[in-house]
Amino acid sequence: MNLNLIYDYQIFLKQKYGGPSRYFVELNRCINSQVFNNEIFAPFHINRHLKDTSYNKGNFFFYKKFNLNNVFKKYNQYRTIRKIQNIKNLIVHATYYDLEYLRKIKCKKVVTVYDLIHEKFYSREKLEKENLKVNLINDVDHFICISKNTQKDLIEYYNVDEKRTSVTYLSSSLKESNYNVKKKKDYFLFVGNRDGYKNFSFLVDGLSKFKKFRDNFDLYLFGGSNFSNYEISKFKEKGIYKNIRFCGNDESILSSLYKNASCFIYPSLYEGFGIPILEAMQNNCPVLCCDNPTFREIGQTSIEYFEPGNIESFIHSLEKIVYSNVFSSNLKNLGKKRRQFFSWQKCAKETQKIYLSL
């Protein structure tokens, strides 16, 4: 008898696109349908990854003037409860951290913990008001962590029994691109949001002190929002405004951006995993990262690292990649080999074992 498996609506109502929603779309695609009756149930959502799948049964909507998020949240919860309340042999894999609405439902509950960014970078007062993870500890049957570092943080911060946790690594879904990158200079690539822990301000400072940057290189930014007034003033203050180009959010060009970059720079102080590392490796792009435990876990020796907060270390590592073809080629080859360790099929297979153990 097959087990019934539902991935709920939460992340698909929060994210238009991004790593967590992509993860659940790929997981649902790769799960063995001979063992599980699996389904993403998101009656209303805003997610483009889900919209583009053949098994999307929900309604995609996009709003600009009115924030209907809370209305559709309540509707999705109502529809979910109606759908699953009488299903037996049920596993609900929540796609985010709000499980209050499932309190009265008899089922096994699984949650994936991506990171503890809020815990590490937000004030205690704000965290206590907003943190949904606190309410999960006694309600969840099993926690899946996307790296050993996230698992360690979860256990230490919330005192979760290690037996209730597992690690499954993510992968990358980036498609090949034939986009023609029209570059005037060689460029470095930054991918993602530019929030505080992403350490983007350090990157700006570091490049402004890299003597050959202004005349010989540009910085291409993919993802996130358009430049804020503060960012523009910062670029001008550092004298590198003309060297920075925002490339938008269209994933159809991202593969080409990696392929043509001198290197991909990932200065984040903390991440739960780091899918862009795999994307760069896949596209033969050397990777330069801030030295943190997660990046060491994912990249091992296939990445060049710089010391957090140390601009001299950053410039030294960047120069090794830029000015040594042998060193850069070696990183590319090591990256290709390391990339083979990660796949969505492997992620799904390990996740299935967790479901079956409950």
Image (cartoon, rainbow, N blue to C red):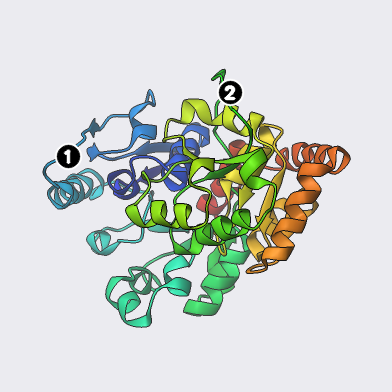
Residue 297 quadrant: bottom right
Q: Residue at x 54, y 20 (%)?
A: 179
Q: Is residue 232 above or below residue 58?
A: below
Q: Amino acid at mark 1?
A: Lys
Give residue 108's quadrant in the image.
bottom left
Q: Residue at x 21, y 34 (%)?
A: 61
| Front-most of residues 2 and 353 | 353
Label 2, on which residue?
A: 176
Dot 1: within a 10 Å radius of its alpha carbon, few (fewer than 14), some, or many (20 or more) residues?
A: few
Residue 259 spot, x, y in % from top left: 65, 29
Relative placement, left or right, of 304 versus 60 is right
Tell me the residue that label 1 is attached to.
Answer: 64
Q: Which residue occupies the foreground of this view, 164 or 232? A: 232
* Picture quadrant where residue 65 is located: top left
Q: Position of residue 349 (x, y in %)?
A: 60, 42
| Quadrant of the snapshot with the N terminus | top left
- Identify the element where label 2 is drawn: loop
